[in-house]
Amino acid sequence: MSSRLNMTASLGDVPHHSDSAVPCSVHDDSTGDIESELSLLSDIESLSASLGEKFEEIRMIHDLTARLELQDDPSETCQELLEQLIVCVTCETLIIQLDPDDDDVLGGGIQGIGKPIELSTLDNIVLAAMDENGFGSGIGEQSSALEDTPDTNAVSKRRVGDRPDWQKETVIVNHSSHPDLANRRVVLMPIARGSVRLGRLIAIRNSSSNEFGTIEVDLMRSVLMVLALHLMNKRQFNEMQSMLEGTVRSLASALDAKDAYTHGHSSRVADLAVQLALRLGLGDRSAESLQLAGILHDIGKIGIDDSVLKKPGSLTAEEFDQIKRHPVLGYEILKDIRPFRHILPAVRHHHESWDGGGYPDGLAGDEIPRDAQILAVADAFDAMISDRPYRRGMPLEKVREIFQKGRGQQWAADVVDALLQSHDLMLAYAEQRPFARPDLQPQA
């Protein structure tokens, strides 16, 4: 009775009920409140866990996207993705296999991380997983011709045969009696953009681990969507690069056909400019720009009269004025071709002089674009050592004297130094030069 009295007192003023009714009513209400609160706490914990997982997914996708560049090698991109993904999705082995039919564009091959797996075992696992999901047997004729290797990194340089129908579906095998899937859980997921197949992800874990769940599969799918977009952009970028290179080769060939005496000059200037840029500590992008600018630096000569361009003797003042137009003509030819816009300053200004006495705009010192400074030295060097209709190529000692004299006056001093300190480079270019007249070859 005392317990009932205490309970009634704690509730304050309540209507009269029987002794048995009061505690029973209080007990039922309290239990309901507690169960409701526990259920709410469980929902909150579940929501918190779900939000945490989604946050990890978003963070991973953000990090991956921030690292992707069109210049990245697809195999390196895939390897970095695997290194991030295996942290979030516990697996024995994670593998990305790019479409072998795309070898020229995306590189084909396989990238893996985790426990090494033999190629034949991988084939059998994929085959079995497909069979379990009704895709039929056979993964392609290529796989049987490949050698086994216990090293995943070695496997990455090979290609497993492919099935077009596999790319349309995600395959999840958490339980199987198939001998090749014994003690394994497997996910096969296509890497695709629309109807375009690009490859697949293969995730393998031991059957003693948890099943592959919806959250993990969704994470893999989200990451592969980002990868697929990147690979498609990479494919289109490479195709555009190939078209651009074809255009460059065509333009260079047109110039070579116009003036046989300068055949190969543009390519040699481009190669030397790249070497000088690297020796000056400039990056790969500057070197790539100089390669393109070097090939096209004289493209404006297409617009110069043949009688002037091929004249065997010295030029008159009027004829030299015509020659001096070629940097501007080259600029005009290339300015409306978007992929060439970044090389326009080098094409236009490769005949500027450090002291301001060059053409076409009379720029001086650091007003001259850096690529143009380098191109000017490479262009002058090749012109000096090469045969011309009116003279033979100069010996290297003479070339050295001219550059020493023009250092800091006609050409940037540090670029001249980079050339003169590279005697091996100068000698190599002089020796490899295909001289137009053997009897006029210079002496090194």
Image (tube, helix red, strand yellow):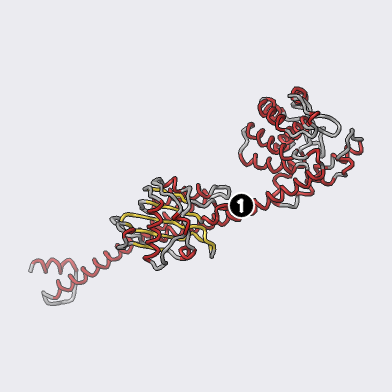
Determine if residue 51 is in view. Answer: no
Tell me which corner region of the image, top left, top right, bottom left or bottom right, holds residue 209.
Answer: bottom left
Instruction: Look at the picture and state if 156 lies above or below 432.
Output: below
Q: Position of residue 361 (x, y in %)?
A: 81, 39
Q: Quadrant of residue 438?
A: top right
Which quarter of the rendering shows the C terminus?
A: top right
Which residue occupies the foreground of this view, 147 or 128? 147
- Locate residue 80, reporting x and y percent: 47, 48
How busy is the neighbourhood of tag 1: few (under 14 within 10 Å), some, or many (20 plus)?
Answer: some
Callout 1 amino acid:
Asn
Q: Position of residue 300 (x, y in %)?
A: 80, 45
> How many labels were placed on the picture?
1
Which residue corresponds to mark 1? 238
Quadrant location, the N terminus: bottom left
- Say whether residue 77 is visible: yes
**Which residue is at 38% across, 57% downward?**
124
In the rendered structure, the answer to whether residue 77 lies left or right of residue 127 reads: right
